Image (tube, helix red, strand yellow):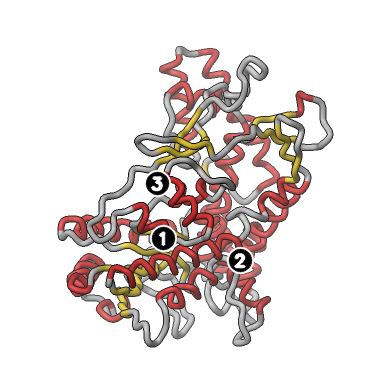
Amino acid sequence: MADSLLNRVLRDYEHYDANKAASLLENIKSFAQIDDLDLFDHSTHRAFAKRQANECRRFRSDYPPFMAVGKCRQLFERYELGDLQFTDDEILRRLSDERFWQRRLRHKSNEALAETERALHLVSSRRGLYCGDKTYDNFEESQLKSQEFLERTLLVSADGESVNLAEVSEHTIANPDVLFAEWMVRIRGFEQVADYQGHVGVMITLSTPSRMHPILKASGKPNPKFDGTSPKQANEYLNHVWQLIRAKFSRSEIAPYGMRVAEPNHDGTPHWHILLFVEPDKLKHLKRIVKRYAMQDSPNEKGASKYRTHFVDIDRERGSAAGYLAKYIAKNINGIKGAEEGDAGRLSAARRTRAWASAHGIRKFAQIGGPSVTVWRELRRLSHSVKDETLEELRLAADSSNWAAFCIAMGGFGGTPKRDIHPVYSSSSIDEEAHELANLNQYGEPRRPRIVGLRNALFGVLTRYKKWYWMSEPPQPKDGLGMLH
């Protein structure tokens, strides 16, 4: 992998210094090496994971639990494979499982590769847009494997009904076209709520300081001010700024609602597009707050005042708010389809943004304010009317894809009280007498509670009636069944 990355760097040069090339190769290898672990040598990862799991099992057998936890944690942290946000018993069980090590290794390896390509200036509009070519290839391979798994897996209900998992995924938000449609329904709905309430919209672009960008966009040359900030760290910076902004909104009694899209610049550095709706008399104050917190870091750098934040007031005579944000959502989900650029090129760009987000663990979309989308999705599962008047009103709105009516019915706009409609969870998913291990995960722990319905203060309704299992290679004997969770 290191040799391949070096060759990609040198490809654009007719002549290069052999000593500098050798030094660069050593730097690439050094970055990928953590103790005895080579992040780029995937052929060794399975054996590595097995060794570490065996070592943790030895700790569990040779030491008291409190000492075993310390030794297992120390071993895990040596390789910088992320946080362990579990109890002591959960840590021991997971670190004794080679599959857990493999999952963490896969994520760490993908992130390291993406950061290396970016540090080598292989991520830019002139080389690899949004992410490096190796990162993109890995993502495509992963997507292909996932699709193959879906196609060879069946969901089987307790009454014998079966359906291919790939067919199911085509009708869920796992399908980019379905996800895009849902987001557009919600954006248009928020805009209709704003019209109903007499609110105004503003499009905000929130960017990072120049030191977080490795490449100068105008020239394509390396940025001498670049400080090594990764895309994940840059996104965490934007998230921190937004948390400060929202806290100030709350103190100022400003309650905007809308959507946020995180997308990469050409060099992989994230920026945010935020569509907000708010009362007209609070718009100027909202802008001042955003500008104030966005400029706290490096406020005097050249171009900061111009580029760090950008505001576009939504003018309904020139276009809808949904239209302003639609291109950013499409660009980050399924590509913008139009005559300006070939559909294939736009789809490729959209897939590269997905590869970028996957490699760096960045959440691309988020709703700001408004009612629970979980309640909305659960209501859309119902194909029949319900007795409770409130829930039926909400069900009809959701079933007709009317996000605006759903928002108004849920309350919280224009001083109306919010309705307390919330999901009902159950940790008991099937008959425990028939399947005594069905409610335990692979580590022998209780499964996470799953949604089974909705309720308000007086009435509840089931939204999930059937109990489903997955079957990896149908038909299989009963012991080939696993619980879908």
The residue at the point 75 percent across, 43 percent down is 163
The residue that mark 1 highlights is: 405
Q: Position of residue 41 (x, y in %)?
A: 65, 48
Of the image marks 3 and 1, the number of the one nearer the N terminus: 3
Asked where in the image residue 388 lies, by quadrant, the reply is top left
The residue at the point 72 percent across, 39 percent down is 155
Nearest to viewer (mark 2 / mark 1): 1
Q: Amino acid at mark 2?
A: Arg
Q: Position of residue 79 (x, y in %)?
A: 50, 40
Q: Amino acid at mark 3?
A: Thr
Is residue 214 found left or right of 206 in the rendered image?
right
What distance separates the C-alpha of mark 2 from that of mark 1? 33 Å
Q: Amino acid at mark 1?
A: Ala
Q: Are marks 2 and 1 in contact (CB under 8 Å)?
A: no
The residue that mark 2 highlights is: 351
Q: Is residue 412 above or below residue 323?
A: above
Q: Looking at this view, name the residue that lies furthest to the left.
A: 252
Asked where in the image residue 283 lies, by quadrant, the reply is bottom left
Q: Is residue 349 above or below residue 163?
A: below
Residue in the foreground of this view, choosing between 394 and 483: 394
The residue at the point 48 percent across, 81 percent down is 220
Is residue 292 found left or right of 348 in the rendered image?
left
The residue that mark 3 highlights is: 390
What distance separates the C-alpha of mark 3 from that of mark 1? 12 Å
What SS does tag 3 mark?
helix
